Image (cartoon, grey):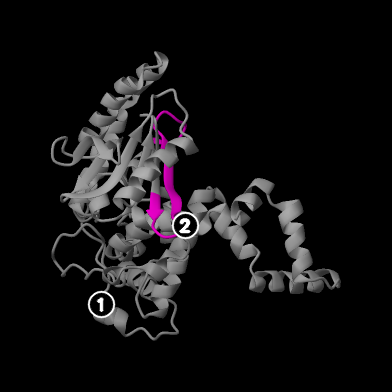
Amino acid sequence: MTAEVLDAKGQKRFQVLLEWSRHAAAAGHAVPDDATLEAIAHTRVVVAEGSGGALAARWEETIVWLLKQAAFGVNAPHLQLPDELGAPAAAEPAGISAGVVQAEEPEAAAEVPAEVPAAAPVKEAASEAAAAPAPAPGAAAASKAKANPPPASRLPKWELAAIEQVREAIQRYVKPLEALRARDANEGDTRMVVTDMLCEGLDFDKFKDLTTEYMVKQDFADYGVRIDKQMVAFIEVKRISQKLNERHLRQVLMYAVNEGVEWMVLTNGAVWQAYHLTGGLPVVVDMAFEIDLLGPATLAEKTDSMFLLHKEALKRRRIDEVWRHRAATEPGALLDVMLSEPMLDELRKEVRRRTGIATTAQALSEVIRTEIVDPKLIAKLFKA
């Protein structure tokens, strides 16, 4: 396989895995070779075949975590790697059936000098395997079948169960949502399906976790969401044919500000938008994600987004990283970076290097504001 056959997302996954492998190798760990990582980037499956697969299987939990970060667009996720994922799992003892081909013992890997490429232990293991006596006829196939069962996922059990629950609910409610849209159902009918999605898909208890018509200063939020008796989110529901807009956001924002609640969700049953509120003067509102359950996104993409609203995922604040990444890379934030003095100074130097023309940071800022960037974004960023 070559890098050319990877699509854009596959190339991003491959780049993330390469950056991690170089970092881990520099720390003295044996890592899978580039060909194995490229295959994983292509299939998104950690396959335990060959010596490279054996190492990959020992790093499976780390690789799965990195692939998820890549799917969310996180740059250089290996720099944010949790401590428990910084080293490979121990190799299976000799003679015990494992889901991977037997790798070198950790002690042998530790003896490899830092300057030796990380793929060297893999090549040595492959050479030793080639020199080993051939098994009896028929034994090779039986041994391979026993040694290489489908690799089990290293995701926590709660996460696997939550992902499956969300996926099944999305599949189950596509037709009811399409029927609601076809007959332009009212808000009350839409709310019934939303309630079912919250309970059956996102695992909220209708009586313990959800409060309907939650009163906030003489007004009522459609849903208040509690986790461990703590109010964590407000949900505002609109009829399925209604396009969600800023007026609806202001409505649920008022509830959140008055009650000191961090998360806000807008939905018309099909489209789900999640927003984070950061308190202060003024308050800051950032969209974490938007997904249309009747839109063109794949089932996996819809599941990944809606999983973030699952009770167990919210409890563990899985949505926080997605929100922070989107807030850091939204157009206004990036424009603010572009117009900062250090960035304009570097841009000024680059213009002179390329063209020989001297200019000023102020002149470049004016060009960016008036001729490159959308005026609406400029007005939003610099409004009083």
Q: Is 139 left or right of 65, judged from the image as shown?
A: left
Let me know if residue 159 appears in the view: yes
Q: Mark 1 points at which residue?
A: 106
Measured in 3D between alpha carbons, the distance from the residue under mark 1 to the one under mark 2, in whole angstroms, is 54 Å
Height in image: 282 above or below 118?
above
Q: Which residue type does callout 2 highlight?
A: Pro
Q: Which residue type does callout 1 highlight?
A: Pro
- Sequence order check, earlier mark of 1 and 2: 1
Q: Determine which of the numbered discs, if any, sits on residue 323 in the image.
A: none
Q: Where is residue 199 in the image (x, y as percent from the top left)?
A: 21, 35
Of residues 113 and 209, which is closer to you in this image?
209
Image: magenta residue range:
276-299
Residue at the location (78% across, 69% down)?
351
The mark closer to the camera, 1 or 2, is: 2
Number of callouts: 2
Of residues 370 and 222, which is closer to you in this image?
222
